[in-house]
Image (tube, grey):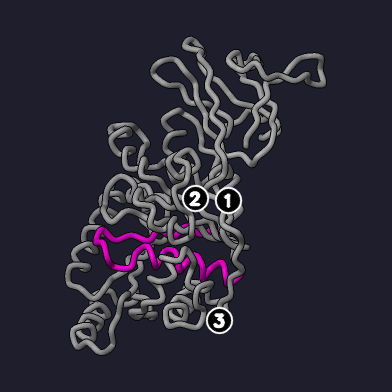
Amino acid sequence: MKIIAVANQKGGCGKTITAVSLAGALAGAGKNVLFVDLDPQGHASSAFGIKEPDSSMTSYLIFESFLATKTADISSIIIQRYQTLWVVPSHITLSTMEQKMANIRGAVLVVSGALKTEAAQKFDYIILDTPPNLGFLTLNALHAAGEVIVPLDISLFSLNGVSQIDDMLELAKDMGFKKPHVNFLITLYDSRSNFAKTFLEKAKTTFSNKLFRTIVRQNIKLREAAQAGQVIFEYDSSCNGAKDYTALVKEIMPEFKGESIHIKPLAVQPQTAPEAFFKLLAPDAENVYLAGSFNNWAQDESSVMKKLDNGIWVKIISLPQGSYHYKFIVDGKWIEDPANNMVEADAFGGKNSLVVVS
């Protein structure tokens, strides 16, 4: 398994489009790919056609689980977007995590730990998209990654972020963390511009063998694809953008000999699925789980309920229309929902609470 982070503190350099297109290219080349959106803006999630996900089903859970001294269940927040491409979307609530985790030991290794779980290890590649800054979330991605791709648009300002990323990685190395391999990618290139040609020559001199041979040309199709919620290989596999990211994946995967990349779209997980809200007043409880016919009565990380300051435990889950049996597990004791008078007999002489989703 290879973990690649795409990072540059400068916005507008094609960072997210590169991360999304690279994931699509690798998936189209036959690799199982997991994409983790660590940017609270959620632009990458939107580019995959995933809009307004429930915060409990996003990368926010990775950090929230750490705060609860538990390991995140990655499998519970993965959305399969293509035949060989899965996505962990982002949510604006992720922006609160830097403040919540300030001064917490091991906070910069949260993502690294989550990607060492069995659920994450089954993928050939994991692509991490980062915010356009060098803060807490980007640092998490850099520590988790074995490789970092830094997109460089044709601007002297993009070079400023390069030195700061290198300084951050050197500082991390001095602190005992591994330093990932860093490579640079020219993006938004316009061959008609003399400035662009001069910039390219400067980049070749500056970065030498750390600069990808591939040059990503300006291509409106890449932006159109993102707006349509599709990777470029689904939107227009014959455009220059698709050709350029095909060339990039050939550099990353020398064994890939294909001339073109095709990716099979799947239905995007419905974002308007009905939600069921569960709550239980149990101020003295130490842990509460929600188990039911909708999760095979599992008592695991995905069924943990969240405790509010008023002593109420809550959980919201998306469920297809239908009827479901459930119970709460309070400090190891299975109980019916005391606030719900809808019950049905179970197979063991007891009763289950009943919820109807419409």
Horizontally, residue 43 falls left or right of residue 191, namely: right
Mark 2 vs 3, N-terminal side? 2
Q: CA separation, marks 2 and 3?
A: 26 Å
CB atoms of marks 1 and 2 within 8 Å: no
Residue that carries the numbered disc 3 in the rendered image: 260
- Answer whether residue 354 is magenta in the image: no
Give the x, y percent position of residue 124.
Answer: 57, 60
Helix, strand or loop for disc 1: helix
**Range of residues picked out in magenta:** 1-30
- 219 w.r.t. 13: above or below: below
Mark 3 closeness class: few <14, some 14–19, many ≥20 residues within 10 Å: some
Badge 1 amino acid: Gln
Q: Amino acid at mark 2?
A: Val
Task: Name the element at disc 2.
Answer: strand
The residue type indicated by label 3 comes to Ser
Q: Residue furthest front?
A: 358
- Among numbered discs 1 and 2, the one appearing first in the sequence: 2
| Circles 1 and 3: CB atoms closer than 8 Å | no
* 56 is higher (above) or lower (below) than 306: below
